[in-house]
Image (cartoon, rainbow, N blue to C red):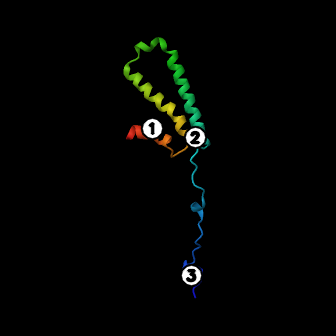
């Protein structure tokens, strides 16, 4: 009669290493929280800078306004995406908007 060790060719069938790790978190970690707060600070600073330049708004070309709008949209969206749970409909919605 063969032993269990010979059936597995001397290999321990219990998982080791990466197989024992917990599944990845779907919430924000510390790094993502820091990035979210820094992105929010950048968003606020950009809004203040744009507001302070109010007297010069007429001289700014339309292409620059378009650029500012897209950058502010992305910078404002970043904290919401980073602080939200991964894999949810809200997390995936911006990608659906952009990539159909």
| Horizontal arrangement in the rendering, residue 81 relative to residue 67 (left or right) | right
Q: Residue at x 46, y 29 (%)?
A: 71
> Quarter-wise, where is residue 95 in the image?
top left
Residue at mark 3: 6
**Which disc number belongs to residue 26?**
none
- Quadrant where the N terminus sits is bottom right
| SS class, disc 3 | helix
Q: Note whether 51 is above or below 31 in the view shown.
A: above
Q: Please, what secondary structure does the residue beneath circle 1 have?
A: helix
**Total numbered labels placed on residues in the image:** 3
Asked if residue 3 is positioned above or below residue 87 in the image, the reply reads: below
Question: Measured from the top left, where is residue 29 in percent x and y?
Answer: 60, 44
| Mark 2 and mark 3 residues within 8 Å of each other at the beta carbon | no
Ranked by sequence position, the earlier of labels 3 and 1 is 3
Towards the viewer: 61 or 15: 15
Q: Of callouts 1 and 2, which one flags the residue occurring earlier in the amino acid sequence? A: 2
Name the residue tied to disc 1.
Answer: 94
Camera-nearest label, 1 or 2:
1
Position of the C terminus by quadrant: top left
Residue in view at x 41 percent, y 26 percent: 67
94 over 22 or under it: above or below: above
Of pointers 2 and 3, the one earlier in the residue sequence: 3
Residue for badge 2: 32
Q: Residue furthest bottom?
A: 1
Which is in the foreground here, disc 3 or disc 1? 1
How far apart marks 3 and 1 lie (CA) works out to 54 Å
Q: Residue 41 occupies which quadrant of the picture?
A: top right
Left or right side of 53 for 61? left
Circle 3: is it few (<14), some (14-19), or many (20+) Cα within 10 Å? few
Labels 1 and 2 touching (C-beta < 8 A): no
Q: CA distance from mark 1 to mark 2?
A: 18 Å
């Amino acid at each position: 009669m063969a032993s269990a060790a010979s059936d597995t060719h001397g290999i321990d069938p219990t998982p080791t290493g990466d197989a024992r790790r917990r599944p990845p978190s779907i919430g924000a970690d510390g790094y993502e929280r820091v990035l979210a707060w820094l992105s929010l600070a950048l968003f606020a600073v950009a809004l203040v800078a744009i507001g302070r330049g109010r007297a010069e708004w007429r001289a700014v070309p339309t292409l620059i306004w378009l650029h500012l709008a897209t950058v502010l949209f992305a910078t404002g969206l970043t904290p919401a995406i980073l602080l939200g749970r991964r894999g949810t409909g809200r997390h995936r919605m911006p990608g659906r908007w952009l990539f159909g």
